[in-house]
């Protein structure tokens, strides 16, 4: 955390992971909501 050189990449990875997780969750939620509607 104190190291500035490792702070940028770490933050970028965290953001990317959070974005990926968010997209996956959104897709899963959408699919789940569409399944009962289709049934």
Image (cartoon, rainbow, N blue to C red):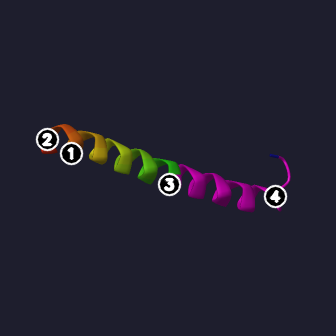
Q: Is residue 7 left or right of residue 33?
A: right
Mark 4 and mark 2 residues within 8 Å of each other at the beta carbon:
no
Write down the region rendered in magenta: 2-20
- Residue 39, percent from left and from top: 14, 40
Q: Residue at x 29, y 47 (%)?
A: 31
- Give the residue at the far top of this rendering: 36
Quarter occupied by residue 16: bottom right
Compare marks 1 and 4 and give the one earlier in the sequence: 4
Mark 2 and mark 1 residues within 8 Å of each other at the beta carbon:
yes
> What residue sits right under mark 1 in the picture?
34
- Residue 19, percent from left and from top: 50, 54
> What residue sits right under mark 3 in the picture?
19
Is residue 27 placed above or below 39 in the rendered structure? below
Compare marks 3 and 2 and give the one earlier in the sequence: 3
> What residue sits right under mark 4 in the picture?
6
Q: Using a 10 Å C-alpha cutoff, classify the residue at mark 2 as few (fewer than 14 neighbours), some (14 to 19) or many (20 or more).
A: few
Compare marks 1 and 3 and give the one earlier in the sequence: 3
- Cα distance in 3D space between marks 3 and 4: 20 Å
Tally of numbered tags: 4
- Cα distance in 3D space between marks 2 and 1: 5 Å
Q: Using a 10 Å C-alpha cutoff, classify the residue at mark 1 as few (fewer than 14 neighbours), some (14 to 19) or many (20 or more).
A: few
Q: Residue at x 84, y 47 (%)?
A: 2
Numbered circle sitting on residue 37:
2
Q: Secondary structure at mark 4?
A: loop
- Cα distance in 3D space between marks 3 and 2: 27 Å
- Residue 3, percent from left and from top: 85, 53
| Mark in the foreground, 3 or 2 | 2
- Cα distance in 3D space between marks 1 and 4: 42 Å
Mark 3 and mark 2 residues within 8 Å of each other at the beta carbon:
no
| Mark in the foreground, 1 or 3 | 1
Numbered circle sitting on residue 10:
none
């Amino acid at each position: 955390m104190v190291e500035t050189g490792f702070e940028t990449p770490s933050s970028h990875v965290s953001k990317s992971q959070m974005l990926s997780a968010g997209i996956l969750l959104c897709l899963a939620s959408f699919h789940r909501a569409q399944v009962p509607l289709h049934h």
